[in-house]
Image (cartoon, rainbow, N blue to C red):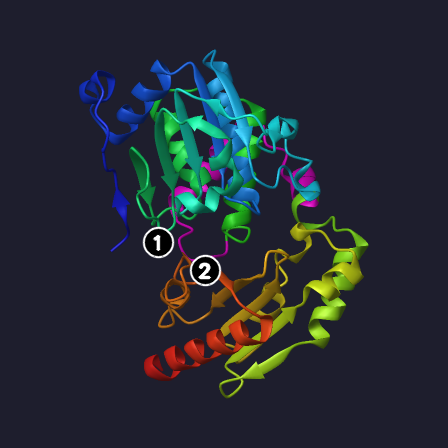
Amino acid sequence: MPLCNYQLLKETNEISAAGSPFDKILAVLHAAENILVTSHLRPDGDALGSSIACGLWLLSLGKKISIWNEDGLPQKFSYLPQSSLVARPPVARQSFDAVVALDSSTRGRLGAVLDAIASPGILVNIDHHISNQIYGDLNLVDSSAPATGQILYDLFQHAKACITPEIATNLFVAISTDTGSFQYAGTSSHTFEVAASLLRSGVEVARLSQAMYDTQPRRRLDLLRHALNQLEFSCGDAVASLSLSLVDAQKLKILPEDTEGIIDHLRVIEGVVVAAFFEELPEGKIRVSLRSKDPRIDVCKICAQFGGGGHPAASGARVQGSLATVRQQFLKAICHEIQSRT
């Protein structure tokens, strides 16, 4: 069953008077004056597109807004309209009437943003991950939605918001990138209806698609060449995996954003059931990304064993330990899951 949990933990007069889950969130945001919008560290298109779209909508309501992300704006997303609104959290702590956390399954995934908030006011958690821990005062979590951007679109429709070309473009990027350009499970007829509506609101598909999918720095191709040379198969060739050490990452002069999507080159290999990517991080942790091509193999369940989460077909975790040890632990867990399910 998809998780559709609209849980209310903090009562106010405005919330109590509201009806639907959308109404409850709208009541809080209309009552607030100073609002922070944030998303998970190492942000992807859904996190950033949703954040900017939400920020622009709140600005249209006359709100004072900030959009923070621990990693700021990755260079590759600079094409997003009003991307300059995204900033790293400041050193001095600030208070807000409300905080909107987008596309983050856990509070901890917000990272350094939490340290910069003196008082969050009411925390609104909007997400589509089945592993969401329902950490907000208000939670709008629908794991049947393929992207947080789609949930936001429905919220805006309920609010009868004016979706400008800038808001539409950010929402389209959120949905397109998180659905693998409308290919992944969870992409529904409603998703295409939303996309069509966004096009009518001013999205320039050809120009935007070139920025999203057809523009990459040369260093990313150098990374891909290096990564494929490290490719290994295990569990009867059902698992394809690769690792990236911190030393190699520094040698290749790559940015953190450059590793996004590398795992997809493993996922497409014929006969591979699960793809795994292990990336060594500076803080002594290993960033793990898993992708499953078989609905019987739930990689969210595997990542949950190590404190991670995500979706049944695409999940991740950050685990303390050495690259070799963490890789061995995960490959063992993956193979066990494959052998027990197939």
- Say which mark, if any, is on residue 315: 2
Horizontally, is 337 left or right of 325 in the view? Answer: left
Overall secondary structure of the magenta section: helix
Where is residue 247? Give x, y as percent.
Answer: 73, 65
Q: Are marks 2 and 1 in contact (CB under 8 Å)?
A: yes
Q: Bin the neighbour count of mark 1 within 10 Å (Cα to Cα): few under 14, some 14-19, many 20 and up.
A: many
Mark 2–mark 1 distance (CA, rounded to whole Å): 9 Å
Quadrant assignment for the N terminus: bottom left
Where is residue 227? Give x, y as percent.
Answer: 70, 69
2 or 1: tag closer to the N-terminus: 1
Q: Which residue is mark 1?
A: 131
Horizontally, is 305 left or right of 332 in the view? Answer: left
Q: Reply above or below: 330 against 97.
A: below
Q: Is residue 11 magenta?
A: no
Where is residue 136? Give x, y as percent.
Answer: 32, 36
Give the magenta-colored segment's residue range.
Answer: 183-210
Residue type at tag 2: Ser
* Quarter-of-image position of residue 264: bottom right
Residue 332 at least partly seen? yes
Where is residue 188? Give x, y as percent.
Answer: 39, 49
Point out the residue furthest to the bottom here.
Answer: 236
Quadrant assignment for the C terminus: bottom left
Residue type at tag 1: Ser
Q: Residue at left 18%, top 21%? A: 16
Q: Residue at left 74%, top 55%? A: 254
Q: Reply above or below: 35 against 336.
A: above
Q: Residue at left 59%, top 29%? A: 90
